[in-house]
């Protein structure tokens, strides 16, 4: 508490001391967690913004009564400077920061409320709350490394006005697509361009080419014209990060892994065909329930692009 009592009474000076001191705690933990431990999880996305809210509010409000508005202002100021630092020092790009923003903002706000309550009601516990939050970050990061990575499934379907044999021909190999118009792909998420196949039947190799590289897909089930199933042997980077600098963040490599895929065709009345595309994937980014919302949406968007391209080409051929 003696250390906190040395904070200046001038609120403008204290604001920047609170901001800088918080950043000196949060920044090394973030860099260590990403590049040292190699973990994108609860410690990074939940506990770090919570720490930012608690520490900045506690330092700014110590020894006086702080309002909710003041607590929120100092917390979000610190979060903003922290985020700017991630961009300027090429630690993260704009896409990932935008995806993490909802939970980051929420947890920073919750941290500001915890800090305000501590300062206003139990100021003697201020350092204890800060230390407990600080210690919880590396402990959680190390614990998360041993957790099991769950397998997720995403399926997308549509109806095509073409016979099943024509659809099958366009499934196994399709020509180059038009440039994407969807915002998600223009923002940097990698997108499919075309596909080609070498060989026929089980053991053939299908290449689904994206703007960042190719998925190499050995065929594991070839039941023409109803089922094409494949494993994923190699895959490209899942996105192109937008930043002032070149970014090679660890999450671009092996944090999102597509394991296998399938096209299922069903013959319908009136010469129509139902086409279902399915992807099985894992990602080691946590909390899983939150990031699954993003990854499922991205995969559905990729499925939609491929399936609609197949639909257009099959209906033209038909």
Image (cartoon, rainbow, N blue to C red):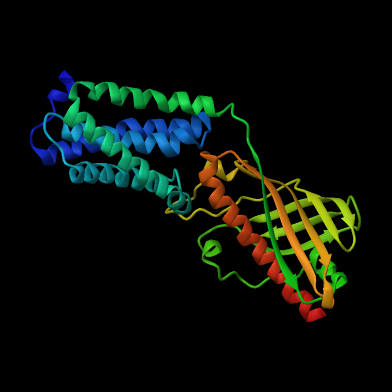
Q: Is residue 185 above or below residue 78?
A: below
Q: Nearer the viewer, residue 43 or 204?
A: 43
Query: For the image shown, how many numbered marks are present on the structure?
Result: 0
Q: Residue at x 29, y 26 (%)?
A: 130
Residue 309, x across and y down, in percent? 70, 71
Location of residue 49 (image quadrant): top left
272 relative to 218, above or below? below
Asked if one can make out residue 87 in the rendered structure from this viewpoint, the answer is yes
Name the side, left or right, on which 280 lies relative to 48: right
Residue 16: quarter of image: top left
Q: Tell me if 125 is positioned left or right of 140 in this view.
A: left
Q: Is residue 2 above or below residue 44?
A: above
Which residue ends up furthest to the front in the rendered image?
269
- Coordinates of residue 81 in the picture (x, y in percent): 30, 45
Q: Residue at x 65, y 73 (%)?
A: 178
Location of residue 210 in the rendering, given as x and y in whole percent from the top left corner: 66, 59
Image quarter of the C terminus:
bottom right
Q: Nearer the viewer, residue 104 or 24?
A: 104
Q: Quadrant of the N terminus?
A: top left
* Residue name at image x 18 percent, y 43 percent: 70
Q: Would residue 176 be visible to someone looking at this image?
A: no
The percent coordinates of residue 123 (x first, y second) are 18, 25
Hey, which residue is sitting farthest top in the picture?
Answer: 2
Which one is nearer the viewer's eye here, 25 or 49? 49
Q: In the image, is 2 to the left or to the right of 239?
A: left
| Residue 129 found in image quarter | top left
Residue at 40% across / 30% down in the picture?
29
């Amino acid at each position: 508490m003696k250390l906190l009592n040395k904070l200046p009474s001038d609120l403008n000076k204290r604001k920047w001391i609170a901001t800088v001191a918080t950043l000196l705690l949060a920044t090394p933990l973030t860099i260590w967690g990403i590049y040292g431990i190699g973990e994108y999880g609860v410690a990074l996305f939940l506990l770090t913004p919570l720490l930012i809210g608690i520490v900045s509010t506690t330092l700014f409000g110590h020894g006086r009564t702080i309002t909710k508005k003041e607590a929120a202002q100092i917390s979000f100021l610190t979060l903003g400077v922290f985020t700017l630092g991630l961009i300027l020092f090429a630690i993260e790009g704009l896409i990932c920061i935008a995806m993490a923003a909802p939970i980051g903002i929420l947890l920073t706000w919750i941290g500001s409320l915890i800090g305000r309550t501590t300062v206003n009601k139990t100021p003697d516990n201020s350092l204890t709350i800060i230390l407990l939050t600080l210690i919880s970050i590396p402990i959680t990061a190390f614990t998360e490394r041993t957790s099991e990575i769950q397998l997720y499934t995403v399926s997308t379907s549509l109806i095509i006005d073409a016979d099943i044999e024509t659809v099958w021909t366009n499934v196994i190999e399709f020509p180059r697509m038009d440039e994407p118009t969807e915002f998600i792909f223009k923002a940097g998420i990698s997108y499919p361009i075309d596909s080609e196949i070498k060989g026929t039947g089980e053991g053939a190799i299908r290449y689904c080419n994206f703007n960042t590289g190719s998925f190499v897909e050995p065929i594991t089930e070839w039941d023409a014209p109803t089922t094409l199933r494949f494993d994923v042997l190699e895959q490209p980077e899942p996105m192109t990060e937008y930043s002032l600098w070149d970014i090679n963040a660890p999450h671009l490599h092996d944090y999102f892994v597509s394991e296998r895929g399938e096209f299922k065709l069903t013959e319908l009345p009136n010469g129509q065909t139902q086409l279902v595309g399915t992807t099985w994937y894992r990602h080691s980014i946590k909390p899983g329930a939150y990031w699954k919302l993003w990854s499922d949406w991205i995969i559905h968007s990729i499925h939609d692009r491929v399936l609609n391209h197949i639909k257009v080409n099959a209906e033209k051929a038909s």
